[in-house]
Amino acid sequence: MIDRRRLLLGAGGLSLAATAVSAAAQGSAPKAVGQPLLGHPDLPDQPSQRMRWAIVGLGTFALGQVIPGFMGADESTITAFVSGNPDKAKELGARYGVSKLYSYDTFDKIAEDKEIDCVYIVLPVGLHAEYTIRALKAGKHVLCEKPMASTPAECEAMIADAKAANRQLGVAYRVHFEPNNVEVARRCASGELGTLRYFTGDAGFNANPDWPPHKWRLQKALAGGGSMYDIGIYAMNAAMMCLGEDPVSVSAVYSYPRDDPRFREVEGGVDWRMTFPSGIHAQGSSSYCYAGGTRQKIFGATGAIVMEPASDYYRQNVTLSNGQPLNAGNPISQFAAQVDGFSKAARANVAHLTPGEMGLRDIRIIQAMYKSADNDGMKVML
Ligand code: NDP
């Protein structure tokens, strides 16, 4: 279990956050714009009598993983789609039996819709804060995709609005619901590896500037940050999940070709290091320049666990110290488990396993890594 007391919550900054968000709303803030249909969904009829969800943004991840995930859910069903592409929404609505279709312009009308309990934000990162806050103001619980938002100020505003609305806000850190990752974290906490000594993790892919879902990831206004925001966050978050601590300081350097035209607005790679209160270090890399993959290794005094891939949608390859594989469950179940976990939390109006505060913590840590990398890898205290 996550010990929420360990999350790096700041007391101040809420009014600053509100100002930042309203300034973003007036100025050069990114706009929600519908995109073409990508992906190949093929889903059966949905069950009813569950927590009812609106999916906001019908992109590749929504179509490929999020919506199919609901098919295995026991507590959750989709009742609405929100999209800027009405033809796509209509086509997908017909295919999945989802009759309520909203656009970004009509989104606020969900406040009057009694058949929506929860909203899942699957938009580019630069739109997370705006749509989360609009959904909370409409009285809905919100599960927001990772990374939580572009800045700590936006995250703070989202958390403040969730509190004001008395609604739950979660960040979709799916590996906390993936059976193999959960079992690895349990083994780390159990002492099975002896005293934990070290964590290393890498996560990256080669960004294609011509593919729409990668295109916005290279634009700061829509992406918030670069490889560390999008993909490095997996290994970084996993380090805290496995070690059971939050870091006290970080250092980082950029590691990507500076003349690569893809990285005019966001960084293409970061090599990072976190120091924990116990004295343990975790280090890793994130990249938009290397072939896709995720890999983690946790070393204890008497054992180690290797995960490669570590945070895949469909397959984790986990090896224990004795060379034996660990098969704790089918990774595909993580998507249903995540939405069901949030549905249960929302129904009981208690904090989700991966709450907004965790999302804020991680954005603060990455911002500290950027600060370090901007200053030749100097140590930055958290
Ligand atoms: P896509 O580009 O495939 O989809 C984004 C969707 O957002 C679009 O299809 C569009 O939906 C909507 N959108 C609204 N405004 C814009 C805009 N200005 N530019 C682009 N799209 C816009 O991205 P992904 O599906 O890969 O990512 C979406 C979110 O999911 C991100 O937050 C990402 O970090 C997260 N993600 C999480 C993963 C995980 O494993 N947890 C994996 C992959 C992504 P429409 O046309 O319906 O309006």
Image (spheres, grey):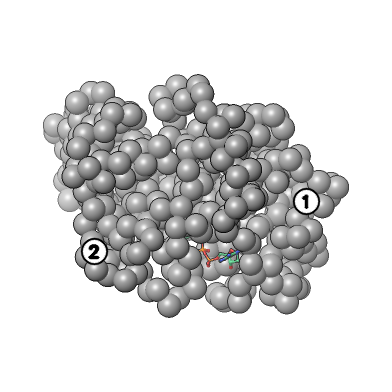
Report whether the residue tagged 2 is closer than 8 Å to ligand 1. Answer: no
Please give left or right for residue 202 compared with residue 117 in the image. Answer: left
Q: Is residue 87 visible?
A: yes
Residue 326 image offset from top left, x and y in percent: 30, 49
Amino acid type assigned to the residue bearing label 2 in the image: Arg
Residue drawn at x 74%, y 40% is 137
Residue 289, horizontal then vertical, whole percent = 27, 66
Q: Nearer the viewer, residue 247 or 104?
A: 104
Q: Earlier in the sequence, mark 1 or mark 2?
A: 1
Quick one: 237 or 326, which is closer to the camera?
237
For the residue carrying disc 2, how many other residues have a C-alpha within 10 Å: few (<14), some (14-19), or many (20+)?
few
- Above or below, 38 against 167 in this view is below
- Say whether mark 1 is within 8 Å of ligand 1: no
Image quadrant in which the C terminus is located: top left
Which of the image's four quarters has the N terminus?
Answer: top left
Q: Secondary structure at mark 2?
A: loop
**Which disc number belongs to residue 157?**
none
> Is 239 rendered above or below residue 291?
above
Q: For the residues carrying marks 1 and 2, which lies nearer the camera in this image?
A: 2
Q: Residue at x 60, y 52 (%)?
A: 27
Residue 108 numbered mark, or none: 1
Secondary-structure class at tag 1 = helix
Task: Identify the residue at horizontal 51%, vertical 23% (top origin).
Answer: 12
Marks 1 and 2, how far apart at CA: 42 Å
Label 2 sits on residue: 258
| Residue most extreme to the front | 27
Q: Quadrant of residue 79?
A: bottom right
* Disc 1: CA contacts within 10 A as few (<14), some (14-19) or many (>=20): some
What residue appears at the point 20 percent right and 30 percent down from the top-left corner? 280
